[in-house]
Amino acid sequence: MNWNDWITAADDFVWGWVLIILIIGAGILLTVRTRFVQIFHLGRALKFMVKNEQGGKGEVSSFGALCTALSATIGTGNIVGVATAIVAGGPGALFWMILAAFFGMATKYSEGLLAIKYRTVDENGHVLGGPFYYIERGIHEVLGGNWKWLGKLFAFFGTLAGIMGIGTITQINGITEAADRIFKEKPLFTLGDKAITVPIIICGAVVTVLAALVILGGIKRIARVSEIVIPFITFFYLLLSFIIFFYNIKAVPSAVVLIVKSAFDISAVGGAIVGLSLKTVIQKGVGRGIFSNEAGLGSAPIAAAAAQTNSCVRQGLVTMTGTFIDTIVICTMTGLSIVITGAWNPEITGEALQGFHVSAYAWEHGLPFADNFCMIYLSVCLSFFAFTTILGWNYYSERCLEYLLGAPKKTPLFLFRILYILAVAVGPYLTVSAVWNLADIANGLMAFPNLVALILLSGVVSKETKAYFQAERHRLR
């Protein structure tokens, strides 16, 4: 076995049935214990999303915390990740991605709630919270004993996930791949299976410098950039996604039927994908969905903990909207465009497309505009999504490192930022498949301690939720 085979085998092991069942199971449990909060209180959550709470403790506004979380979740997973899932698992993978996201909304709500309930705020207003604190303090409150070791385990995997996978390499790889497709230059040289061109080198260098300028400014600068970029670029991405939807409206019903049928019957895709199994369909759908919206990973509550709020339930609702926007809306529109145009199927495209090229084909063939315009537009959206993810995950991994170190320490954190920036710099020169598999492994390892904590603390989530909405009903009488 070569290096890529080992990585693939490790990815398959980590994202086996145990983790998939744990993620879906935790989502179902929390959905029931919160009385389907994602259905009955989504409207309230969307209102809270844009209406900041006055007088709350924290470092950034609730909207700023959400945008920081969205900056980390809305990235290449929404464009490249969805494409990768459908290419590997067929259209049915989109069904499992959406289903996981539905239950993931309850998971994300619970993460945000627990992040505020168990966070710490020092005399300087510096906030540290997230899974490591609700693992350590929350489980101790419920079961007793010392659970700091499990919090440390989460923080270790979270640091690795940020610097090795989801936060750096996959994002810069997606940006440079988009630039390479636009300019279509001849390779200067190859690194393994990776052809390196001038656009890849230049684009990689520019993004690295820009990321360094923001990252070295800390959380408040990251939040300010995210609050501006995320709403703006999300609107423009969805605008063209809906144009694809309505321009090809006659093909939508058959695409939806194919998505649902192939989610349970792999023969529905014919011979389009060799060696496809039902496990692969579910694995790719759930895995790429979690990669995109991060429900269950424990990343978003790290940002939620910094929110200026005094209500853990209110911030839980705001945090929940991240999964709705990321997967239920954006990933669904991306997936539909790919299935409608047949971009996932080599029998239609004439070649086996991968990654960004799948989404690019969908836009070029699904929109009534010139191919160059579609390509540049999609590339710009991807670049902004991926760039903000680089920023958001730097914040996440720094907070994980702070917990591992025991307190904020300037020199180690500065050195970590330099190392993080260097990881961004080398990302363009790695192959796509190896990059995504490494990111999947880091994500899966990170999810295990967090999911255990969410299941053990589901009673706390239920109690806080019930008390908040009872108080709201009394207030309105």
Image (spheres, rainbow, N blue to C red):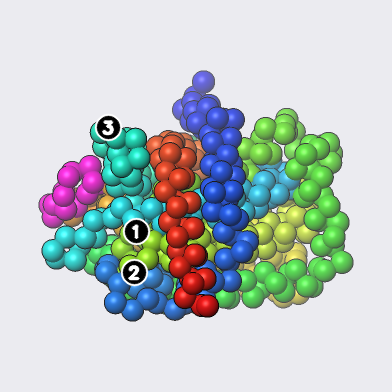
Q: Position of residue 426 (x, y in %)?
A: 36, 48
* Magenta residue check for 406: yes
Q: Would you say the magenta stretch is mainly helix, strand or loop? A: helix
Name the amino acid type tagged 1. Answer: Ile
Q: Residues within 10 Å of mark 1 (few under 14, many from 20)?
A: many
Q: Which picture quadrant has residue 449?
A: top left
Q: Distance from label 1 to label 2 (Cα)?
A: 8 Å
For marks 2 and 3, the one nearer the N-term is 3
Q: Secondary structure at mark 1?
A: helix
Evaluate whether residue 185 shows in this view. no
Q: Position of residue 124 (x, y in %)?
A: 14, 65
Span highlighted in magenta in the image: 401-413
For marks 1 and 3, the one nearer the N-term is 1
Query: Closest to the observer: 118 or 227?
Result: 118
| Residue identifier under label 2 | 309
Query: Closest to the observer: 379 or 291?
Result: 291
Query: Closest to the observer: 151 or 333?
Result: 151
Judge depth for marks 1 and 3 and give the one in front: 3
Judge depth for marks 2 and 3 and give the one in front: 3
Q: Residues within 10 Å of mark 2 (few under 14, many from 20)?
A: many
Name the amino acid type tagged 2. Answer: Thr
Residue 470 relative to residue 396: left or right:
right
Q: Are marks 2 and 3 in contact (CB under 8 Å)?
A: no
Evaluate whether residue 88 shows in this view. yes
Q: Are marks 1 and 2 in contact (CB under 8 Å)?
A: yes
Task: Look at the picture and state if 122 lies above or below 283.
Answer: below
Residue 145's label in the rendered image is 3
| Residue identifier under label 1 | 116
